[in-house]
Amino acid sequence: DNGVAHIAWIDNVSGVDAAYYSAYDFAAAMFTSMDVGISANATLLGGDVDDPIQISADNGLVAVCFQNRIVSGANETYANVMLGGAWNGDALVGNFTAGVDDCDNNDILVNGNNVIVAWEDNRTGSDECYIASADTSGGGVVFGADMLASTVGAGYPRLMGGGDYVACLTSSGAFPNTCEAAVSADGGMTFGGAFSFSDTTGDADYVEGAFNSTYGNFVTAWLSDDAGFNNCYAGGFRNQTATAVGTFAPGNLVHFDASGFGASENGNLFGVLLSGSTGSYLLPYGDGRDVGLTQDAFMSYSLGHIPGLMSGSLAGGAGSTVDVVMPNLAPGTMIYFAAVGFDAGANLYSVTDINSVTTL
């Protein structure tokens, strides 16, 4: 992070397992912090720090989470945040019953001023995934209410993202396990309901992911034993999308909806690009991203009506174009489309995946 390596670990040099932190500045070629204890409160309560210990940093804001074992078989999730160069103090995160419910497999992500923690616990009788987030822009660390991020059990939560978009990935608890995700479009402060994004038929485990900030999509990988033994599979998804609405037959009124766009784009616009095939089209105004469509008559029509018939306003991450009369196209014509967020200054923002509709 900005040329600094932030390091956290557990060791028993003090006689009990505790968490420590060091920072190494590559430009200065020296440690700027070394062996700083960051689990004093957990130790004071008689706990032993347990793995996993996770660390995340963004522009100098650093956060660590770990498990604290005070009662055997009932681990508790703790986090500590460094604000302005000073550690805030380790504290319990989550609304589970301490000393009764058992937490496991925590993860943490710092995204701008937001600190997001995910873990699994068995407060309902089986392991589910929960998320708690804190906005540190006011100079304090107060985690909000737990948000459920799984549907039928969960294992090994993983957090990733940037800007508006943050995702929590898990493998479900019902056999055969599937890969699930809950996604935030406001930087990790609130999350939508969990959904499955894997179509393997075996038992899916150990899902990992990364965020592509250029295109605003999540790339994922997991193990699944479809063939009777584990293979590695890859997939992914975007939160922002466009949908064709109406019956696409000559003379009918049709339009396009946008949804899932990031909170920072509220008040901006979106435009829908049309094409008769997939291919390569680089976005204009110096943007250069490839939306994966072909520049043809459909594309020329849509570009000629943005802003206009093929654009709309975004509010709450969603919007609609106006209804247009479907022209006389041959039945079975495939129309591919994607949406792009933009503002009045011709700055371009989120890009959706490609969807399609077939004329009747």
Image: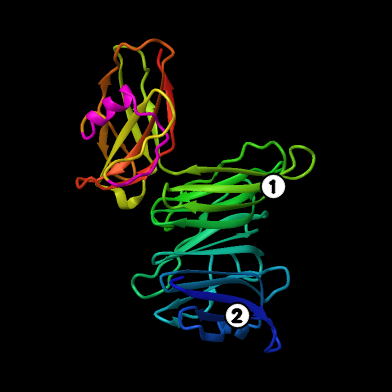
Q: Nearer the viewer, residue 11 or 337?
A: 337
Q: Nearer the viewer, residue 345 or 42?
A: 345
Extent of the magenta region = 286-307
Q: Is residue 333 magenta?
A: no
- The kind of secondary structure the magenta stretch mainly shows is loop
The answer to whether residue 92 shows anywhere in this view is yes
**Horizontal arrangement in the rendering, residue 37 relative to residue 27 (left or right):** right
Label 1: how many residues lie within 10 Å, few (<14), some (14-19) or many (20+)?
A: many
Q: Residue furthest right?
A: 228
Rendered residue at 61%/40% (across/down):
198
In this figure, which residue is indicated by the disc labeled 1? 223
| Amino acid type shown at disc 2 | Ala
In this figure, which residue is indicated by the disc labeled 2? 42
Rendered residue at 60%/51% (across/down):
170
| Amino acid type shown at disc 1 | Leu
Work out which quarter of the rendered image holds the C terminus and state it. Answer: top left
